[in-house]
Image (cartoon, rainbow, N blue to C red):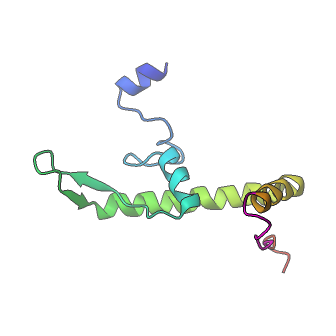
Amino acid sequence: MGRALAAQGHRPGTSTSGTKRMSAIDLAQKLPEQRPIRVYDADPVTDKRTLKPDATLAAQAKATELNDRFADRLWEDPDSADDHLQSGDRANGGCLARPVAPGTT
């Protein structure tokens, strides 16, 4: 089935959480690294890249939506949130500040 969808031009991760120009997987990789979300077209002859503003804004909006959904899901289950915080704290040598859950301040 995946090959049939690919043959029709469907890219996994683009219809729900991604865009036609940037998949959800690409967005999810950029978010934790705080890399800019930008969409370019490349000229096939010169390889010069041209920023595509409309596609970039669409990808940035999807990235915000994806980030918000992750944060909401993280805080839905306190045990899961605590597990994530502890693993992040261990990975960073105990130097992470503990965030406050939304609505508890």
* Image position of 89 (left or right of 41): right
Q: Residue at x 59, y 55 (%)?
A: 66
Farthest-out residue, right:
79
From what the image shows, is residue 33 above or below residue 29? below
At 37% from the left edge and 48% from the top edge, which residue is drawn? Answer: 21
Indicate the quadrant containing the C terminus: top left, top right, bottom left or bottom right. bottom right
**Residue 42 position within the rendered picture, expressed as x and y whole percent measured from the top left:** 21, 51
Residue drawn at the location 74% of the way across and 54% of the way down: 73
**Residue 59 point in image, percent of width and height:** 43, 57
**Residue 78, image x, y percentages:** 88, 58
Indicate the quadrant where residue 82 lies.
bottom right
Magenta highlight range: 91-99
Q: Is residue 51 magenta?
A: no
Q: Quadrant of residue 68?
A: bottom right
Q: Residue at x 48, y 23 (%)?
A: 2
Q: Tell whether 64 sits left or right of 37.
A: right
- As for residue 92 lying within the magenta part, the answer is yes
Q: Is residue 49 above or below residue 97?
A: above
Give the overall secondary structure of the magenta segment. loop
The vertical placement of 35 against 80, above or below, is below
